[in-house]
Amino acid sequence: MKNIFFSLLAFLSLSVATAQKPNKNSKKLLRHVVIFKYKESSSPEDIKKVTESFVGLKKQISVVKDFEWGVNKSPEHFDQGFTHCYVLTFANEKDRDEVYQKHPAHKAFQEVLKPHMDKVFVVDYWVE
């Protein structure tokens, strides 16, 4: 009888532990890192306008979970002229690909950016 009791107790404990364990994929976030090298002809005001337009996408596109940005301040000088880094967070690839990339606000932002972008570097990754 003791063995049945302890077996049942172990089974229930394992069931509860498994049920409370969060789904590994549900916690992961997709980061979309965009780094720009602006044209030398672009003024600080032009770059500010591009940045404001990019930052504004968070309010316009609901699938953008988070947005942050900054200007490179690395003393290592490995930036190859890339100066501005923007990081957007998505829950999944579909939100990034089917909603964000195709959204009219994103397309309008690209039109603001085009005259000022010299080069762009993009990295997407799942947060570990």
Image (cartoon, grey):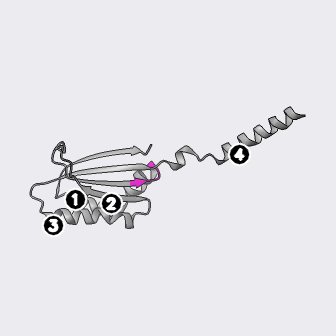
Query: Separation of disc 3 and disc 4 at Cα?
Result: 57 Å
Q: Residue at x 29, y 46 (%)?
A: 122
Between marks 3 and 4 in the image, the one whose residue lies nearer the viewer: 4
- Furthest residue toward top: 3
- Furthest residue toward right: 1
Q: Is residue 125 visible?
A: yes
Q: Nearer the viewer, residue 45 or 17?
A: 17
* Mark 1, secondary structure of its residue: helix
Above or below residue 13? Residue 48 is: below
- Circle 2 packing at 10 Å, graded few (<14), some (14-19), many (20+), is some
Residue 76 painted magenta: no
Identify the disc placed on residue 16: 4
Between marks 2 and 3 in the image, the one whose residue lies nearer the viewer: 3
Q: Earlier in the sequence, mark 4 or mark 2?
A: 4
Q: Tell how many labels.
A: 4
Q: Which residue is mark 2?
A: 106
Q: Which residue is mark 3?
A: 45
Above or below residue 10? Residue 94 is: below
Q: Earlier in the sequence, mark 2 or mark 3?
A: 3
* Mark 2, secondary structure of its residue: helix
Between marks 4 and 1 in the image, the one whose residue lies nearer the viewer: 4
Asked if marks 4 and 1 touch (Cβ < 8 Å), the reply is: no
- Circle 4 packing at 10 Å, graded few (<14), some (14-19), many (20+), is few
Query: Separation of disc 1 and disc 2 at Cα?
Result: 10 Å
- Circle 3 packing at 10 Å, graded few (<14), some (14-19), many (20+), is few
Identify the disc placed on residue 113: 1
